[in-house]
Amino acid sequence: MSADGAARRPYHMRDAFFIVGPTAVGKSELAADVAAELGAEIVSADAFQIYKGFRILTAKPDSKTLAKAPHHLIGSMSILEEMNAEKFRRAAVTAIEQIHARRKPALVVGGSGLYIKALTHGLTSDWKASNVNPPGVLVFRDRAERCARIDLRVEAMMEQGALDEVRATGPMSATAAKMIGLREIRAHLAGEMSILQCIEKIQTATRQYAKRQLTWFRNQTNFEPLNLSLITHGEAVKGITARARRAFAELE
C-alpha cells in the first residue's frame, strides 16, 4: 500500500490488520499464533461468537488458543440482545482504540463479511469503488478439504455437548437464534429427526454458509488471498506475520 493509501485509512483502522475467511478453515488458531508473534490483540468479527454461552455450537476458540493473545468481542453480549452491523462497528472501534491506547497492534479476525465491511468502509460504501484499502489476508482451503473439516467439526461438536447447550437454552434474541445448528438440534430434541439426520443437516447448512462467506469476500474485498491447503500452519503464520509487519511499518 502506498503512503497515500495508508493515510486514507480511518484513524481507528491504523495499526489494524485483517484475517478473514470462511468458517472452519482455521482462522482462530492462525490468528492467535500471528498475534503472539506481533504482540497484538485480537478483535473477533464473528456474528455468533460475540454472544455469551454456546461455546461449542459457535466454535469459540479453546482456552489454549485464547491464552496466546488477548481476545475481544467473544462472549461479550447477552444472548437476549439483538445484534447488527452498526452495533458491531461501534463495539469493534472501541476495542481497537483501547488496543491502540496500550500501544499494541490489532488483528481483526472473522468471517462475518457485513460486520467487517461496516468496520472498514461503513454500511453504504462500495468496497470496489472505495479508495480505502485495509491491509489483510483472505484465508481459505480447497473445497474438498474445507467440506471435510466442516463435517469433522460438526461431529466433534455433537460429541462435546452441543445438544446439552441447546437443551439448556432459554429465551434469546431473533439474531442469536439464527446461529447455525440451533434449529436442527431443537428439531432433534423435539423428536422430529434422528441424530444422524440432525448432524447431516448441520453439516450441509455449514458448508452452504462457508460457500456464501467465500463468495462475499472474493467479490467485495481486496484482501490478499492465501490458500492454506498449499502450505503448512507454520508457513502461514510466518507469511501473515511478515505481511502485517510491512503494513504496520508503512504507517511509521
Image (cartoon, helix red, strand yellow):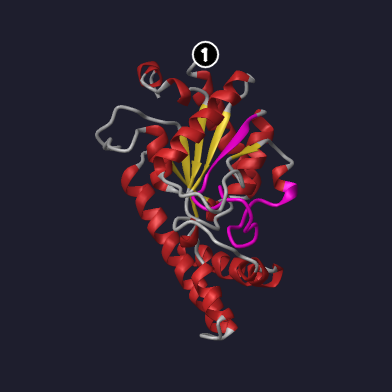
Residue 93 appears in the figure: yes
Q: Is residue 98 above or below residue 185?
A: above
Viewer-side residue, 133 vs 161:
161
- Name which residue lies at 30% across and 27% down: 131
Q: What residue does disc 1 label? A: 252
Left or right of 93: which side holds 168? right
- Name which residue lies at 65% across and 66% down: 165
Q: Is residue 120 above or below residue 44?
A: above
**Total numbered labels:** 1
Q: Main secondary structure of the magenta part?
A: loop
Left or right of 149: which side holds 61? right
**How far from the left and from the top, in percent, is residue 102?**
64, 20
Instruction: Give the quarter of the figure containing the N terminus.
Output: top left
Viewer-side residue, 187 vs 114:
187
Query: Magenta stretch: residue 249 in it?
Result: no
Query: Magenta stretch: residue 54 in it?
Result: yes
**How far from the left and from the top, in percent, is residue 89?**
44, 36
- Name which residue lies at 56% across and 74% down: 185
Magenta-highlighted residues:
40-64
Residue that protrudes farthest toward the left in the picture: 129
Q: Amino acid at mark 1?
A: Glu
Which image quadrant is residue 132 in?
top left
**How far from the left and from the top, in percent, is residue 62?**
70, 52
**How far from the left and from the top, in percent, is residue 37?**
67, 32
Q: Is residue 120 above or below residue 230?
A: above
